[in-house]
Image: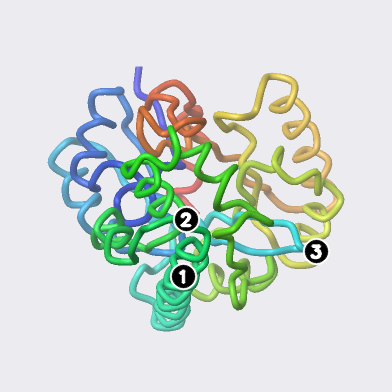
């Protein structure tokens, strides 16, 4: 049976496989519609789309934008937008530069606590993608400072730890929604179970034209899915318009700690993915 997965990552951000390798994995998993949603970049989409054509897989342009709301990290997914839109690409390039500057600050802080790593080592893990804390974590694992990526975050990279550096500027959810809309896309709040912000999500739907909710996710159990299915139905009535329901595995790699669920385990019904395609 054909399946859809609208949330996954490649080496263009913090995933473990190139877009081409990832599409081959999708084919093995029986996926027919997917979206590559790398963090704050669209660099892998053209490659994924071309490979998808040869494999009979439809690739929906996607991105996962990092935002901050009341000092809490909130991720916003974008779908079916113009990946070459100049305003979008200008903002993503600024984000890329900010990430690079932040990397050098993180490395300097870690060096001060006798963790001997370099920015160049982290950039090699990032390859051509956006560099971030997961790449620093991989270097820490490789050099024996920690056993795995989760320990790297707990010991060195999460808020309050020696290597943590707050981003100089982060989009608000509304700014991310507006940016996705300017590029002609749909804005969907990712994995809402992480945030405990249901009232805020309702406001983003009613006041800021948020298009939908990631109801199905690797970390959403059956009770959580029912909870958000119920809320989306309520929010549709209040907004008097269709609210999209999306979902996916949030796949990075089979060995990346809590991100290790294999492709094909968390999927969504094809009609939900087709609604995104038809927008």
Circle on res. 172: none
Residue 99's spot in the image, x, y percent?
A: 45, 70
Instruction: Of the two numbered discs 1 and 3 on the same chain, state the one appearing first in sequence.
Output: 3
Q: Which of 111 and 64 is in front in this view?
A: 111
Question: Dot 2: within a 10 Å radius of its alpha carbon, few (fewer than 14), some, or many (20 or more) residues?
Answer: many
Q: Name the residue under label 2.
A: 133
Residue 161's spot in the image, x, y percent?
A: 63, 54
Q: Nearer the viewer, residue 189 or 115?
A: 115
Callout 2 secondary element: helix
Question: Dot 1: within a 10 Å radius of its alpha carbon, few (fewer than 14), some, or many (20 or more) residues?
Answer: some
Query: Foreground mark, 1 or 3?
Result: 1
Residue 32's spot in the image, x, y percent?
A: 31, 32
78 above or below 182? above
Which residue, as the protein is rendered here, is positioned at the far front? 114
CA distance separating discs 3 and 2: 21 Å
Query: Foreground mark, 2 or 1?
Result: 1
Instruction: Of the two numbered discs 3 and 2 on the same chain, state the one appearing first in sequence.
Output: 3
Q: Mark 1 points at which residue?
A: 108
63 above or below 88? above
CA distance separating discs 2 and 1: 14 Å
Q: Mark 3 points at which residue?
A: 70
Residue 101's spot in the image, x, y percent?
A: 44, 77
């Amino acid at each position: 049976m054909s399946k859809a997965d609208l949330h996954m990552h490649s080496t263009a951000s913090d995933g473990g496989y190139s877009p081409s390798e990832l599409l081959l994995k999708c084919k093995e998993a029986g996926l027919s519609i997917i979206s590559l949603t790398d963090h704050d970049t669209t660099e892998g989409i053209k490659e994924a789309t071309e490979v998808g054509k040869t494999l009979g897989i439809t690739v929906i342009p996607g991105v996962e934008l990092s935002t901050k709301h009341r000092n809490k990290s909130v991720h916003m997914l974008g779908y079916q937008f113009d990946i070459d839109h100049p305003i979008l690409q200008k903002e993503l390039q600024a984000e890329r530069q900010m990430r690079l500057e932040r990397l050098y600050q993180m490395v300097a802080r870690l060096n001060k606590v006798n963790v001997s790593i370099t920015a160049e080592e982290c950039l090699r893990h990032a390859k051509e993608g956006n560099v971030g804390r997961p790449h620093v974590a991989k270097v820490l694992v490789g050099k024996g400072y920690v056993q795995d990526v989760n320990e790297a975050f707990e010991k060195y990279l999460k808020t309050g730890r020696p290597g943590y550096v707050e981003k100089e500027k982060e989009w608000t959810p509304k700014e991310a929604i507006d940016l996705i809309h300017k590029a002609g896309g749909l804005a969907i709040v990712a994995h809402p179970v992480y945030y405990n912000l249901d009232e805020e999500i309702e406001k983003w739907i009613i006041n800021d034209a948020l298009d939908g909710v990631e109801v199905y996710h690797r970390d959403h159990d059956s009770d959580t899915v029912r909870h958000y299915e119920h809320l989306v139905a309520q929010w549709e009535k209040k907004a008097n318009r269709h609210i999209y329901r999306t979902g996916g595995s949030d796949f990075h790699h089979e060995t990346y700690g809590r991100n290790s669920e294999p492709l094909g385990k968390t999927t969504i019904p094809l009609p939900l993915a087709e609604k995104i395609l038809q927008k």
